[in-house]
Amino acid sequence: MVIVAPFNFPLEIPFLQMMGALFMGNHVTLKCASTTSAVMEEIVRMLLECGMPPGDLNLIHCGGKVMNELMKQGADHIRTTQFTGSTGVAKDLAILLEGKIRVEDAGFDWKVLGSDVHDKEFVASTCDQDAYAHTGQKCSAQSILFAHKNWVDAGLLDDIRDIAAKRNHADLSIGPVLSVKTDEFLEHTAKCAAIPGAKLLFGGKELEGHSIPKCYGAVVPTAVHVPLSQIPAHFDLVTTELFAPFQIVTTWDTEEDLQTVLGLLERMHAHLTAAIVSRDMQFVNRVIGHTVNGTTYAGIRARTTGAPQNHWFGPAGDPRGAGIGSPEAIRLVWSCHREIIRDDGPVEPTWTPPEPF
Amino acid sequence: MVIVAPFNFPLEIPFLQMMGALFMGNHVTLKCASTTSAVMEEIVRMLLECGMPPGDLNLIHCGGKVMNELMKQGADHIRTTQFTGSTGVAKDLAILLEGKIRVEDAGFDWKVLGSDVHDKEFVASTCDQDAYAHTGQKCSAQSILFAHKNWVDAGLLDDIRDIAAKRNHADLSIGPVLSVKTDEFLEHTAKCAAIPGAKLLFGGKELEGHSIPKCYGAVVPTAVHVPLSQIPAHFDLVTTELFAPFQIVTTWDTEEDLQTVLGLLERMHAHLTAAIVSRDMQFVNRVIGHTVNGTTYAGIRARTTGAPQNHWFGPAGDPRGAGIGSPEAIRLVWSCHREIIRDDGPVEPTWTPPEPF
Amino acid sequence: MVIVAPFNFPLEIPFLQMMGALFMGNHVTLKCASTTSAVMEEIVRMLLECGMPPGDLNLIHCGGKVMNELMKQGADHIRTTQFTGSTGVAKDLAILLEGKIRVEDAGFDWKVLGSDVHDKEFVASTCDQDAYAHTGQKCSAQSILFAHKNWVDAGLLDDIRDIAAKRNHADLSIGPVLSVKTDEFLEHTAKCAAIPGAKLLFGGKELEGHSIPKCYGAVVPTAVHVPLSQIPAHFDLVTTELFAPFQIVTTWDTEEDLQTVLGLLERMHAHLTAAIVSRDMQFVNRVIGHTVNGTTYAGIRARTTGAPQNHWFGPAGDPRGAGIGSPEAIRLVWSCHREIIRDDGPVEPTWTPPEPF
Amino acid sequence: MVIVAPFNFPLEIPFLQMMGALFMGNHVTLKCASTTSAVMEEIVRMLLECGMPPGDLNLIHCGGKVMNELMKQGADHIRTTQFTGSTGVAKDLAILLEGKIRVEDAGFDWKVLGSDVHDKEFVASTCDQDAYAHTGQKCSAQSILFAHKNWVDAGLLDDIRDIAAKRNHADLSIGPVLSVKTDEFLEHTAKCAAIPGAKLLFGGKELEGHSIPKCYGAVVPTAVHVPLSQIPAHFDLVTTELFAPFQIVTTWDTEEDLQTVLGLLERMHAHLTAAIVSRDMQFVNRVIGHTVNGTTYAGIRARTTGAPQNHWFGPAGDPRGAGIGSPEAIRLVWSCHREIIRDDGPVEPTWTPPEPF
């Protein structure tokens, strides 16, 4: 069994996956992102100190190419692999391993705000955390916000801007972006803002006074408003996931708008997480019923991301879809269905052998 | 969604799979084995007559190559595929579809008889049906029998021979073998019987007085006894699945023998079905605990095959493993986990916005 | 086992109870209300015709006194009794049978309408049915309606009056009242309307042009509005269940009013059914969380009574509480918990006998 | 809510019951046996020290008469009572409380040994503990042993005698009997041994060299063998529970004997606990299927009593039956069924008001 884990939660993700695998009785080979694998090495040392049998786990420090070659050579002996990372690598591994893989890959996660405005301060705070906490580097980060006009009229977008403005490098509420450089970030922002009718809401600048190396991105929390009517025509651009503190915002109002929103949600391809913010159970159920995201938060307190508190987190609708942390995920990935039929009742006294058939 | 189904249960297998897929709300493309796909065509006509929306199902008559090309061209639009058939094709499709597949492939199914002899007539009858019903062409057919010496001493093997001897072509209790020709069958029988200490128990001959075309096999029910001690050295030969009325029989006695048997069961690679025949719950639990077959029958009435009454039927321990017929299988193949978190309680009166992080 | 069943659903209630008892393997003695027991006699004849073993069921036609004497004499042989009827008889039987009884007794059932007005026509129709269908003779009938001011302003009470006005004896949408006579009904109505600030909303008259015998009641659908502030002081009068087409209506508006309403709901003693009408999940959950009624309908379509579609129907919070119709009720009344511990694993090789203790 | 608890497990029983009641949100009044209630007083002091709200629990030190009078006066305010103790008091309380009670009363607990002899040393040790641990003062103690002849031939009864002989007052493996005096014990033993064909197997004497006060019993572990054929004629004597270190032993052999045994098990009236010792799953299932004891241990390691490890422990087949310790028992006694129907979907667009009915 193999686990391949990403950089962004260097302890939580591989540790939950590894412990789930071990609890279910597997022999595990673990490869973490090379940028952060020192973290797991310390944990493994601690586990050994606590009495973990050394033969239960292999920890490998290496880059993707070396791991790929190792898995190629050992493919016959790998019964399953859990992969968390980009969609492209997931696809290559699925072919290499003849489908014996479970993946948790990209997420372009949406939040829809219903027409009933309640607890605005709380919702603004949640939007800020969903989009910008961990410098936007969660697979479950809020990538697009569909706000009903009532929320915009009530000043929600200003509130989000004000909270984001408090983020700074000094207290680490904003930090380095590991997989998107500053100029790539600014270029994507500019493209989105150039869509007809679109405008930069806030951000769109390099972080000031930082000491982050050039190989990483250093940017301030950014939001671009794109009119709902323009999104269908610029769908690929608008729904490109930037693993960074960036979100698209749009506004809806009428029943017709809502149908456009539901159509866009259906058209997205990475159904990882989502949030539906409302107290109206009919509205919430309608959006749930028309979408398929794996982890979907519903209710006035809904967020797109519970990490690191952790729930399921896996794409829905993909046979390779895994999940992390939950009992359901552990069973799905690290165990399998086995059907045992106890046929131990007495043979009926009137039984006679059937004719051969 | 695609279903690719085999010849041996031309109605049951594709029908159960297709109905499960439709019930879960999928749009299905179905390809049956070209030798028997007329059966499903009639069923589909009936379903249309009963009101099935014509757009819900595509039925394709074609051979494997054409289907392969179709799936290659449409791979991006296929969200999952259920395949029932040979291991080789399963592997090719898994690569083609980047793992978006669920398979039910080969089975080399075993039965172990414990030391407590009860209901001998019933068990003999069950052994006959498991090995030879449907002319041995069930994926869940009994391929190898590990009989405790007490059963052999009690005459079980003679009983099985006597029941098998009643099978004949006239009443269709023995019929054509679709994927193994007569000479291939006899050649495999001879090889097994040539293992040191092995002997033909019964059968090993062409069927007499039949009108089966040469392109199909026509043979009588056959069993070869191989000493337990010789199986490890001839493992690949002994565990080759013959999709035909053929079984290997062996005898065990001591605790040491039992450990050899458990080692052999672990070494087999296609963990489809199995049976453990005993009333002793400790013996039954011990064998269950040391094996992983997907569908495992336990108890004095245990069989290797419930088809066509149908249970799960899917390999265990393979992330691509599917199953047919059971609610668990339908959900696993045709639906997916979706986690919905209702976060609709009131915001606590004492809540204040957290610092950005 | 004994079943004692009421007049108002002469087929449904005893039949569901009796079949549940028989399915669970009990030997049943059934006594229906003497006014309507001819109905069950026909059913029992049909069951016998269908093959029911005659020894499984005793059907007794008699009045309450005779049944009481029978149960007294046979109390040692009665393992449980299911009683549906009045609170007084339930109490007497509980003592007679030393607690070996399950009861479904009176209900003074409430409905609360939240501040969000939706689907007014539907809700008015549901209120009419809850209060007046079956001429108000359901244990789950709506006895009191707590309507938010927004609903009253929107004209809900007028709508309910207009629908009730269509009820008439000719099409049997209003019929005889079996346990309350006309003058008793009118007297209770007058008393309620005499509470300070209260007024008759509609009804309060004898039915015109009917041929119902004097021993039964014959009245039109009736509603009396009582100010919320007056209910605590007239609690016993306002919460007296009239098994007839009668309801109390009141109006609430503020948070303080809502707390008064919740206090009244807690103070009622027969927690049978209830309804909470709103789409706001926080409001619905708050009322659910502060109440204990056994069957509680929640949502914009909520009603107080699903009979005869049937759900649980049993009081909550009483150890003798039963229920009718649902699997949970059948198990609770007609079966019992049994804990079987399988302790069949092997004795550990290192086991030694413990010291006696 | 009230709990009335016995002397024999002065901490475990009331503590489990009280904590279950508190966890489920009840306000509890607790009365322990007056001989041992000092134990709970200390625990309650500890709970208060740990922060338990003082208003959640009333602890009363008094005898049964005072408690009875208290409950009589407060009967209207007691929603349920959990009683553990004798059958007679249970019956009186059930009448007083109009059935609002859950009881765990007497147990005359049986063990049946099947024909397959395994792990004799282990089974002998378990028999000793079941009958004599805690000086036989468990409601779940082994009161009668139905041993298959094969076990007797193998020397099981001698083994049980030898283990019992090691019990002594010095190490407290035998202690005072609180509710049966020495002469009452010896008199009952003599009566049983006087049944035709019966004989004293071991014991039947006063304990030597003890300092136990006269008001308590002081006896050695005792067993009387009564022929199976004599039990039906002396049923009441043989099945009288002695809350002391005493057991009846009998032997069975044939199918006819087994039917006699099953008839006797059915005839007993206090179905508390039981054990079926065998590895043969058909035998075990047959005995389970013909009996109704609440807690039934099955398998070669089966015992009649898991106390103080604790399982369910409540009579089966009595609507007042409670249980202690298990989640099922806590829910049954301290909570109730509540059915909430969410009817919050949209009203169908084609809906029109029904005719009044």
Image (cartoon, coloured by chain):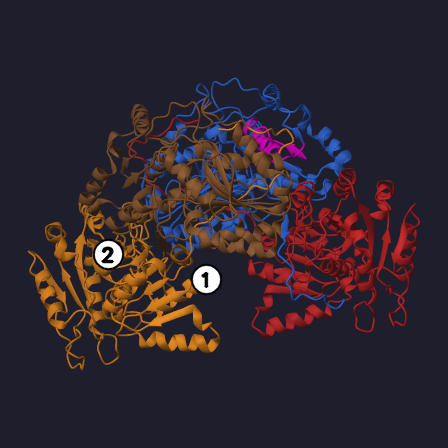
Chain colours: A red, B blue, C brown, D orange
Quadrant of the rendered structure where residue B255 is? bottom left
Q: Which x, y percent locates residue C324?
A: 40, 40
Asked whether the residues under marks 1 and 2 belong to the same chain, the reply is yes
Left or right: D86 in relation to A215: left
Q: Residues within 10 Å of mark 1 (few under 14, many from 20)?
A: few
Disc on res. A252: none
Q: Chain of mark 2?
A: D
Mark 2 lies on residue? D91
Quadrant of the rendered structure where residue B125 is? top left
User: In what quadrant of the picture does the C terminus of chain B appear?
Assistant: bottom right
Q: Which x, y percent locates residue C258?
A: 57, 54
Quadrant of the rendered structure where residue A9 is? bottom right
Q: Secondary structure at mark 1?
A: loop
Q: Amino acid at mark 2?
A: Lys
Residue closer to the observer: A248 or D119? A248
Query: Quick check: is C52 in the magenta stretch?
Result: no
Residue extent of the magenta highlight: B1-27
Mark 1 lies on residue? D25
- Which residue corresponds to the image point at 81% horizontal and 52% vertical from the top-left? A153
Q: Chain of mark 1?
A: D
Q: Amino acid at mark 1?
A: Gly
Q: How many marks?
A: 2
